[in-house]
Image (spheres, grey):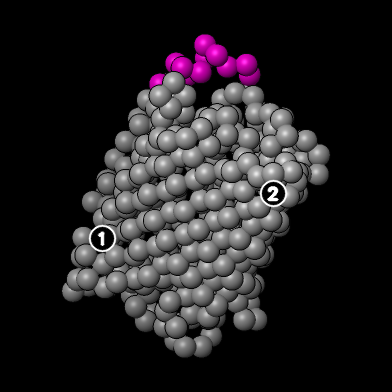
Amino acid sequence: MSSNAVLSKKFWAFAAILIAAAGLCAQIPFLAESKGFSFEGGVSVEMVVEGNSALVGFHPDLTLYFDEVKPDGRPTREAAFLDHVGSAAIAANIYAEGAERDPQQGSGSLYNTMLGFDARLHWVWDVVPISLGIPLSDTRIRWRYSEDDTAAVLSYHMLAIEPGWYILPSTEISLGIGYVLPDLFYKVTPGTSIYSYLAWDISMLSARVKSVFSLPAHMWLAAEGSLTKFEDSEDNTVSSAGLNLTYYPLPSMGIGFAYSSSSYTEGGTHTNPLFSVMGVTSFEGIVTLELFPWLGLRLVYAKLVPEDTDYAPVGNARAIVSIRL
């Protein structure tokens, strides 16, 4: 068994213990006061377009809130945040085959598939009030020249701890520290059976602030800013900053804009091929509609511009339907 496989097993064993312990602790404060639970399930269909190629994504998700979530005249998507309601969520990421240009060859196509999941435990202790977020994810991406000719396989696992503090009832700041364990098998020369293997230890630091403001005439504004830094053992880094604004002219309708920018800095003697494709600037336009108290719809269009000029800009359209109980 490879050393990276052992690390992967230890990683998930640690993640399971940490989440189980945090989940147990989360029950203590809310069981005495909880009036019930709320559920939200949804599905997102995504179309990624690059040049003449397209990739279709499918993302089912489920969220359990540890108390009832009632909008009461506020934006439905902000009610849990405003009421400091903790939650546990999981989402799957499934992408059907799509074609993308092979930057190594300068022409031709690679066909890729992706399967992964994201999970998050968000515990809130409203007495102080403080919060603790534990996000984790696992993803496997495969690129193929043809059905029987694999170009590369990338797997990565991520776990983070994000303690937070509500400095105001409607404003939360959080800091995060995390660990990413990726490994990559890739074909050195197309048409051969020679593969190379790379693995890294990547640390992650993050900071986030979110606030929701009440405006006159029953309007609302939600604002969120974030900073994130990834660094590997060779001192290669990816630094990113993001801003997300959503204006709610009505509690049942939101119009949003999101911007993020990531840059790759080569710091050591060995480049990091995973980092080199993470340098991206993205713009998103978002429309949120609450059609019924139990049914919501989000429409998102994003434009991604890679820092690496070997990759073309990518258009991304998503439709997300949510059902609440």
Query: Above or below — where is 49 with respect to 168?
Result: below
Q: Residues within 10 Å of mark 1 (few under 14, many from 20)?
A: some
Toward the viewer: 59 or 197? 59
The range drawn in magenta is 25-36
For badge 2, the amino acid type reads Tyr
Q: Residue at x 64, y 24 (%)?
A: 68
Toward the viewer: 205 or 317? 205
Q: Residue at x 74, y 43 (%)?
A: 217
Provide the residue designation for mark 1: 232
Query: Above or below — where is 186 with respect to 77?
Result: below
Query: Above or below — where is 314 with respect to 137?
Result: below
Residue 299 locus on image (x, y percent): 71, 57
Provide the residue designation for mark 2: 248
180 relative position to 267: left or right: right
User: Tag 1 or tag 2, which sits nearer the N-term?
Assistant: 1
Residue 261 locus on image (x, y percent): 45, 67
Element at label 1: strand
Q: Nearer the viewer, mark 2 or mark 1?
A: 2
Q: Is residue 27 magenta?
A: yes
- Residue 99 shows in the view: no
Q: Quadrant of residue 70?
A: top right
55 relative position to 149: left or right: right
Q: Residue furthest right?
A: 292
